[in-house]
Every structure is written in C-alpha cells, then in structure tokens.
Image: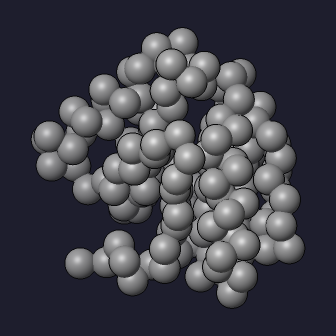
C-alpha cells in the first residue's frame, strides 16, 4: 500500500504526528509512506520518502498515486481531498500541545463528522496512533 501523509505548511511543528507515522511505517514495512512534513521533524525509516513542501499539483498527484491519505485537519486540505474523491484519515492539531494557535482543527473535524462528511477522524491521544492496513477503513 502507498500512503500519502501531509502535515501542510503551518509553522508550528506536528512532531507527535510525524513520530507516530514513523511507528506506523516501522510496523508496516510492506507499505511505502510519502510524507510532506512542512515545519515538523523529518520522519525517518526505510519505507518513508520525505519532502518538506509540495506544490498543489504534486499533492494532487499523490492523491491519485496513493491508496490512503493521512492528513492534518486543515479545512482547505480536507476539502481538497474530499473534492478529489478521497476519504482522508484526518488528524487534528491541538492547541494545548502547541501544535496550533487554537483548536479550530479539532472543532472543524467534529463539525464535519456531525454533518456526515466522509472522513475518518483520529483524535490522537498524546502517545498512541497506529495506522492499520487499508482494509480496516473500507466499508
């Protein structure tokens, strides 16, 4: 499976997310992880391919190339994935963990869930997030 991961371009690090992607890649060595990490730490692993930033066209290409998209919960990013007919796995940034200036990502993710948008929300606790195989997310 090919997994596209994006933390976007927000200047506050999303280290917690990147470290959990490292663990998921280590536990799923048969999969390839394509990670746009922005201002976060660079995740490492034999099956992790990283870019600090991507152009819009590069991101659209990754949406088509990959089997799974895991992303921060920025509203524009989520709607871009949804408009590309992707059901994204969405991981919101938290204010109290210094990942964003407020909790709008958490609030907006919950709002989209309440309205029935096709997203898979992952409200990560501070220590645990495992990406399982694609079959776990199919209906």
Reply above or below: 130 against 36: below
Q: Is 116 drawn above or below residue 92 in the view shown? A: below
- Residue that appears at 72% across and 72% down: 26
Q: Indicate the quadrant where residue 53 lies.
A: top right
Q: Residue furthest top?
A: 101
Quarter in which the C terminus is drawn:
bottom left
Question: Left or right of 98: which side holds 139?
Answer: left
Residue at 35 percent of width and 50 percent of height: 121
Give coordinates of residue 131: x percent, y percent.
52, 67
130 up-or-down from 76: above or below: below
Q: Is residue 33 left or right of residue 139?
A: right
Q: Is residue 14 left or right of residue 45?
A: left
Q: Position of residue 33 (x, y in %)?
A: 70, 68
State the residue in front, 49 or 42.
Answer: 42
The quarter of the image holding the N terminus is: bottom right
Vertical placement of 62 versus 27: above or below? above
Is residue 97 visible in the rendered image? The answer is yes
Report the side of 12 relative to 41 (left or right).
Answer: left
Rendering coords of residue 94 (x, y %):
49, 27
Residue, x 39% and y 83% (percent of image)? 135
């Amino acid at each position: 499976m090919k997994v596209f991961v994006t933390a976007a371009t927000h200047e506050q690090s999303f280290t917690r997310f990147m470290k959990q992607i490292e663990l998921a890649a280590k536990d799923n060595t048969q999969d390839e992880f394509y990670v746009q990490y922005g201002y976060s730490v660079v995740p490492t692993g034999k099956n992790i391919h990283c870019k600090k930033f991507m152009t819009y066209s590069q991101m659209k290409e990754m949406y088509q190339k990959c089997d799974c998209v895991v992303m921060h919960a920025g509203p524009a990013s989520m709607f871009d994935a949804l408009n590309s007919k992707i059901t994204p796995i969405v991981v919101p940034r938290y204010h109290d963990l210094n990942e964003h200036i407020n909790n709008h990502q958490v609030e907006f993710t919950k709002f989209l869930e309440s309205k029935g948008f096709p997203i898979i929300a992952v409200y990560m606790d501070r220590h645990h997030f495992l990406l399982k195989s694609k079959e776990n997310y199919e209906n």
